[in-house]
């Protein structure tokens, strides 16, 4: 794995880890407002979307 591939993998893992953390936080804080919880869920979905886009771009660059 090249250095660029390692960096990309680290970013994808960080984004996905952040998404999991946000969903976990939302589940632990049921007394927060619905808007705050919805915001956490949107942020988590956005992190996952970015991770998927990064991976898709890497596959396109590799010619897969």
Image (spheres, grey):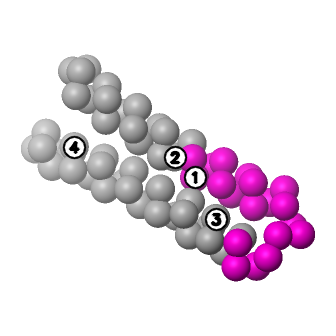
Q: Which residue is mark 3?
A: 40
Q: Residue under circle 4?
A: 58
Q: Quadrant of residue 10?
A: top left
The alpha-carbon separation of the residues under discs 4 and 1 comes to 21 Å
Q: Which residue is found at the position 66% from the left and 74% from the top?
A: 38
Quick check: marks 4 and 1 in contact, CB under 8 Å? no
Q: Are marks 2 and 3 in contact (CB under 8 Å)?
A: no
Q: Is residue 64 above or below residue 46?
A: above
Which secondary structure, mark 3? helix
Alpha carbons under labels 4 and 2: distance apart? 16 Å
For marks 4 and 1 on the same chain, the one whose residue lies earlier in the sequence: 1
Mark 1, Cα crowd under 10 Å, few <14 / some 14-19 / many 20+, is many
Task: Please report the residue visible at 80 percent of the width from the left and 60 percent of the height from the top.
Answer: 27
> Magenta stretch: residue 35 in it?
yes
Q: Which residues are magenta?
A: 18-36
Q: How far is disc 3 from disc 4 in space, using C-alphas?
A: 27 Å
Q: Where is residue 25 drawn, in percent x and y? A: 75, 54
Q: Nearer the viewer, mark 3 or mark 1?
A: 3
State the residue position of label 1.
19
Q: CA distance from mark 1 to mark 2?
A: 5 Å
């Amino acid at each position: 794995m090249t250095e660029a591939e390692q960096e990309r993998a680290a970013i994808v893992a960080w984004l996905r880890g952040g998404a999991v953390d946000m969903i976990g936080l939302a589940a632990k804080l049921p007394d927060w407002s619905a808007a705050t919880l919805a915001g956490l869920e949107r942020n988590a979905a956005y992190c996952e979307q970015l991770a998927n886009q990064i991976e898709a771009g890497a596959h396109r660059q590799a010619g897969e």
